Image: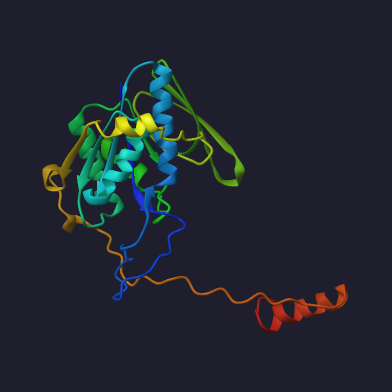
Amino acid sequence: MRIFVCIKQVPDTETKIKLKADQSSIEESGIKWIVNPYDEFAIEEALKLKEAVGQGQVTLVSVGPKARVVDALRTGLAMGADDALIVDTSTPLDNLLTAQSLAAVIKSEGPPAMIFLGRQSIDMGVSATGPMLAEVLGLPHASLVSKFSHEEGVSRIEREVEGGSKEVLEITGPAVITANKGLNTPRYASLPGIMKAKKKPLKEMSLADLGFNSEQNKVHLTNFKMPPEKPPVKMISGEANQQAQELVKALREEAKVL
């Protein structure tokens, strides 16, 4: 059983983001990079599936600059994944080209039993790569998965839908699953796991090896801007009836929402 987990390296949520002078992208120097938190749920679920079945191989796949993305892959290997592959590219790829690259890697490595991803990356938050990967591979998929079990080739899935409702699905055979928060509790990388990760196989590929190039990007992002500063909080003093009158007046004359 070959289980693939597609992961992304993203800036730490506590990192102070700065923009390049030309506003073409963020300034990457000084950023602390981590495994996308949603992808940690994906790694954990892949490891749990391997343990439940009693055999298998968990393979991590990532697209990005080798110089730093290798750290994210080593983190996943330290958690317990068996091997990893990286598509080395210094140019950011859009969701479609990323999905096509991941699909090409998975096809070249052999038929997948299951593919896991995080529901979205915390830097871009598009939630498109998983469904696109499923489409390119011609596989069924389920997104926002909060419960997952697998028995005798059938995956039973519970996923969140609008309005707080739950949807229960059964999928036979290989599928693409995007993990939601709450699916599991990702394990920590132990010291022995960290030491073993240094010796686990890590294969490198380029976009050219897969028949792609960065010029095939369909989406190009420009003119990045920081969010505007939030206005200071206005405190209203006085008795309750006075506060209510002042609040209505502020909403009507200042906020102009009434």
Image quarter of the C terminus:
bottom right
Q: Is residue 220 left or right of residue 175?
A: left
**Residue 133 x/y as whole percent:** 30, 41
- Residue at (31, 62) in percent of width and height: 28
Image quarter of the N terminus:
top left
For the image, the number of numbered tags is: 0
**Residue 118 x/y as whole percent:** 41, 42
Q: Vertically, is 177 above or below 30?
A: above
Q: Is residue 252 left or right of residue 87?
A: right
Q: Is residue 129 visible?
A: yes
Q: Vertically, is 55 above or below 214?
A: above
- Residue at (46, 56) in percent of width and height: 13
Q: Is residue 83 left or right of residue 122?
A: left
**Residue 6 x/y as whole percent:** 32, 39
Of 198 and 33, the residue lying toward us = 198
Q: Quadrant of residue 140?
A: top left
Q: Is residue 96 left or right of residue 120?
A: left
Of 203 and 119, the residue lying toward us = 203
Colour approach in the figure: rainbow
Q: Vertically, is 177 above or below 172?
A: below
- Residue at (60, 40) in percent of width and height: 165
Q: Is residue 59 visible?
A: no
Of 75 and 98, the residue lying toward us = 75
Residue most extreme to the bottom: 253
- Residue at (20, 52) in percent of width and height: 89
Q: Vertically, is 253 above or below 135?
A: below
**Residue 229 x/y as whole percent:** 52, 74
